[in-house]
Image (cartoon, rainbow, N blue to C red):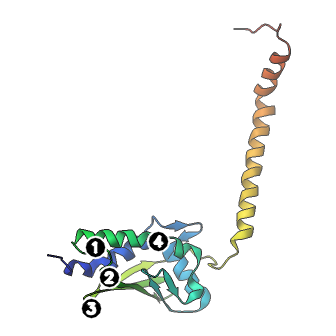
Amino acid sequence: MAKTKTLNGLAYSLAQSYFSTYNYYKKGYLSDWVVNGMNGLGIKAMEIDILQERITPVEMEMKPLMVFIKDLKPKMEKALVNNSLSPDFLIELRFHITIKGNRGMRCHGYAKGINGRVYEAGDYFENSHEVFDAFYNPFWEDIISNLKHRWFVLKMILWRKYRIGGFTLRYTRRLDPEQKIKI
């Protein structure tokens, strides 16, 4: 017999997984991206539809939030299969996120099954610590980061070539085969 009562905690565990410290993207964790994005837009509430992979308002559909939504579907399907349910048992799974105070976040998750029952979980609370502009232009930042990395690699190659002198010594030995090697 399928156990549907255990699905009450599914939305909470998915929220905990979504906002965990494993999900870090460039400048901060997902809670930082959500709070900074909502503060940047001047809104106090948003909603994430996990099955449709949509975020409302649409302005909040930024890459850091959308990348990790795809990881929630397999976790949801695994929980359903472990409870002897079909993977398409849920027809709706959403997070309703609101900002508490300045840097706090409250996530209320619920799921709706094909039997018409709504499975609600407890609220998940998270605090945001990093402050940054969530709507930045990553194009220039990626170019600058790439140039810094290439400059570092070039400096290391030149340092190894001229500072240590290993390359020039090998080069002269190859040109003068009669040079005796001291052992």
Q: Earlier in the sequence, mark 3 or mark 1?
A: 1
Comes first in the chain, label 2 or label 4? 4
Amino acid type of the residue that numbered disc 3 sits on in the rendered structure: Gly
Query: Which amino acid lies under the numbered mark 1 shown in the image of this protein?
Result: Leu
Label 2 environment density (alpha carbons within 10 Å; few <14, some 14–19, many ≥20): many
Tell whether 128 sits left or right of 77: right
Q: Which residue is mark 1?
A: 80
For label 4, the residue is 70
Marks 2 & 1, CB-CB < 8 Å contact = yes
Residue 171, how many percent across, how many down? Answer: 82, 22
For badge 4, the amino acid type reads Lys
SS for dot 3: loop
Mark 3 vs mark 2, CA separation in Å: 9 Å
Q: Of residues 125 and 76, which is closer to you in this image? A: 76
Whichever of callouts 1 and 4 sits on the residue coming sooner in the sequence is 4
* Residue type at the position of mark 2: Leu
Residue 158 position by quadrant? top right
Q: Which residue is mark 2?
A: 90
Residue 116's disc is 3
Q: Quadrant of residue 109?
A: bottom left
- Relative to 162, 59 lies left or right: left
Helix, strand or loop at label 1? It is helix
Quadrant position of the C terminus in the picture: top right
Classify mark 4: helix, strand or loop. helix
Q: Is residue 14 visible?
A: yes
99 on left or right of 182: left
Q: Is residue 81 left or right of residue 60?
A: left
- Other-residue count near label 4 (Cα within 10 Å), few / some / many at <14 / 14–19 / ≥20: few
- Image height check: is 7 above or below 81? below
Q: Nearer the viewer, residue 102 or 35?
A: 35
Q: CA distance from mark 2 to mark 1?
A: 9 Å
Residue 95 horizontal/vertical position (percent): 41, 84
